[in-house]
Image (tube, coloured by chain):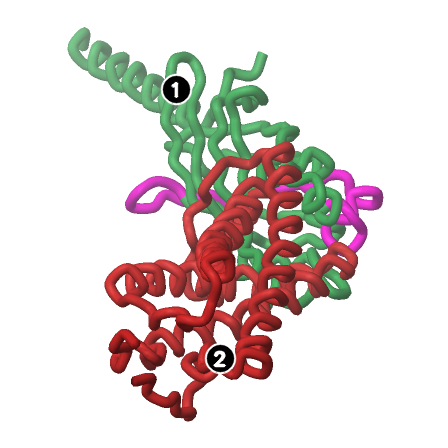
Amino acid sequence: MKKLALAVTSSLIIAAATAAAAAAAGGVASFTADAQQSRLEFVGVQAGAEFKGVFHKFTAGVEFAPDALASSRIDVQIDMNSVDSKDKDRDATIRDKDVFDVSHNPTAHYVTKTITKTATGFAAVGALTLRGVTKDVPIEFQFAPADGGAKLSGSAKLNRLDFGVGQGEWKSTETIGDAVKINFSLVLKPKS
Amino acid sequence: MPNQNSSTRYSAVAQSFHWIIAALIVTQFTLGWTAQFLPLGARKVARLDWHKSFGMTILALAVLRLLWRLFNRPPELPAGMTPIEKTLARATHVLFYVLLFVMPLTGWMMSSAKNYSVSWFHQFTWPNLIGPNEQAFDLLKTTHDTLSWLLFALALLHILAALKHHYWNKDDVLKRMLPFTKTEKRT
C-alpha cells in the first residue's frame, strides 16, 4: 500500500514538473534593442553601383525564445528621418516626397507574424509598413544569447517599388535598382 | 638630312589611342558640362553614370597608352621647328598625359568622397579610393572642374598648332596622325 502511494505521488510530481517545464517553454524572454550598439542598414543600387545607408534611430521590441516560436515576436519602429547614406544631397532626396516622403510617413514599422526554425537559424514573415504601404516581407536571422541579453542579426530583401518608394523620375530602375537589401544587427538587453 | 624613313608616321596603334581617347574626351566634356546644369535628380545621376564609365575607360586606355609610348618613340618633330617650339610641343604632350590620369583619378576620388561608388557600364564596381568626406569632395570637385578648363585650353592649343603646321608650315605633323593619308618620305 505504501509502495502504491509512493508510486502515485511520484507520478504526480513528475506530471507537475513536466507541466511546469511546458509552461516555462511557452514563456518568452522580453528584450529591447540597445540603440547605441544596434545597426540597421540598407543596401541599394544606384547607377549600377551599390550604396549603403543606415537608420540611426529605431526602436525594437523583441519577445523571443527558440523553443516558443509561436509566441515570439519582433517589432521594429524606424525613424525615417534618421536616414544616413553619407551624402547630404542624397539623404535630402531620399527624405523628399518622391522617395520616403518623411513629412507624411515619418516612421516605418515591421512586426513579425510567424517565426520558424531553419537549418541555419530562424526565418520570419512580417508586415512592413513603409511609405504608407503594408506588405509582407520575409527575413532570416540568427539569435544568440549573450551575457544577460542576446544578439539578433540577419537580413532581408525587398523591392522598393512594392512600397511606392520612388515616384516620378525615381520610378526608373535603370538609375536606382528595385531590389534593396536590409542588414540588421540588434544588441538586445532584457526589458526592465 | 638625317634619315627618318621609319619615323615619319605614327603607327596604327598610336593613331588608334589618339583618336579613340580624343573622341572619348569630347564625349566626357559633353556629358560632364551638361550634367552640371541639370537639377539633382535621376537624369543627372544617369548622365554622370555614363560620364564615370567613360572616364574609367579613358583611365584604362591611358595606362595602356603610356606603356605603349614608353616602348615606342614617336616620329621626330620637323627639323624646321625652333628649340622653343619643340619644348612647347613636348610640354603640351606631357601635360596631356598627366591630365589623362589626373582627370579620371580626381573624378573617381570625387565619387568615393561622396559615397557614390563608380560602376563600369553596370558590369562591375570599382573600389572606393577614399572614404566619405564632404570637404575632400568639394576640393576634388574644384580641382576636376578647373583642370577640365585647362584640358579644354590645351586641346584648343593642340588643334590650332596642328592646323598651323598643316596650313602655315606645310609640314606633315597633322598628316602623320591621320589614318588613310600618306606622308612623303623625307630624304
Which class describes the residues within 10 Å of circle 2: few (<14), some (14-19), or many (20+)? some
Residue B38: x percent and y percent? 76, 61
Residue A13: x percent and y percent? 30, 14
Q: Colour of chain B?
A: red
Mark 1: secondary structure: helix
Residue positioned 28% across, 59% down in the render: B70
Q: Which residue is mark 1?
A: A20
Residue A187: x percent and y percent? 48, 23
Q: Are marks 1 and 2 in contact (CB under 8 Å)?
A: no
Q: Nearer the viewer, residue B56 or B95?
A: B95
B154 above or below A184? Answer: below
A138 above or below B24? Answer: above
Mark 2: secondary structure: loop
Q: In whole angstroms, how far apart are the C-alphas of marks 1 and 2?
A: 96 Å
Q: Quadrant of residue B62?
A: bottom left
- Kindly identify which chain the residue marked by label 1 belongs to: A
Q: Which residue is mark 2?
A: B174
Q: Is residue A102 magenta?
A: yes
- Kindly identify which chain the residue marked by label 2 belongs to: B
